[in-house]
Image: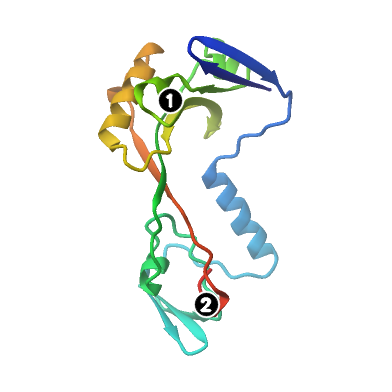
Amino acid sequence: DNWRFIYQGKSHDFLHEGQEKICRRDQFDAFLARKAVERGASLREGEEVKEVKLEGEEMSVITQKGEYRARVVVGADGVHSLVRKARGFPKGPALTLCLLIEEPADIKNDPALLFKMFLLDYSCMEQGIYGLYYEIPCLINGVPHVQRGITDHNPDLSTGKLKEVFQKELAKRGVYINKHQLKAFPERKIDVIANDQQVL
């Protein structure tokens, strides 16, 4: 219901009651898979892709359980895409690095949950971060959580420096990084790939 922006000790709230929704990636992916199956697609699960090859007008996708052929293969397998590597496409320059933790939270006391609030704090820019610290409320398996993260758009910044600043931002809020699983998500530029390459 609320966006809170913070910088240099000042904050401003924008009220957007009911305008934003949080959807976990695993739930969203499962929803898309169900819709594809409902529309006639066949779904193969538990099959690791081993190789992707271009053979004439078709692509061959080889897993540990078999081989599939298609005119088009969508490389939706993340920043370290096997599909991209198999076709020899460049991975693109680094754009953003995100570090985050997720922790169960008290819905009556944690501001992100209490006020249904996205918190975006740009104060970390003063420490050389070209990005922001954020808090987002969410439900994980029906349990209220807060995702706390930091992003940086400077491709030259080391992960170590970003982690150091993240630790400081968390400590300000009484949260300590060594008590949580730290996750890292890089983001890279994706160039448009011509249709005749068969991989989108």
Q: Nearer the viewer, residue 163 or 21?
A: 163
- Amino acid type of disc 1? Glu
Q: Position of residue 101 (x, y in %)?
A: 40, 30
Tell me the tag on residue 103: 1
Residue at 46%, 27% (x, y): give it.
Answer: 132
Residue at 59%, 58% (x, y): give it.
Answer: 33
Q: Position of residue 177 (x, y in %)?
A: 31, 24
- Earlier sequence position, callout 1 versus callout 2: 1
Q: Position of residue 13 (x, y in %)?
A: 64, 16
Relative horizontal placement of residue 57, taking residue 157 as reference (left or right):
right
- Looking at the image, what colour scheme do you see? rainbow
User: Where does the N terminus fall, quadrant-wise?
Assistant: top right
Tell me the tag on residue 198: 2
Vertical relation: 192 (above or below) 105: below
- Amino acid type of disc 2? Gln
Q: Position of residue 114 (x, y in %)?
A: 60, 14
Q: Can residue 141 be seen in this snapshot?
A: yes
- Mark 1 Cα-neighbour bin, 10 Å: few <14, some 14–19, many ≥20: some
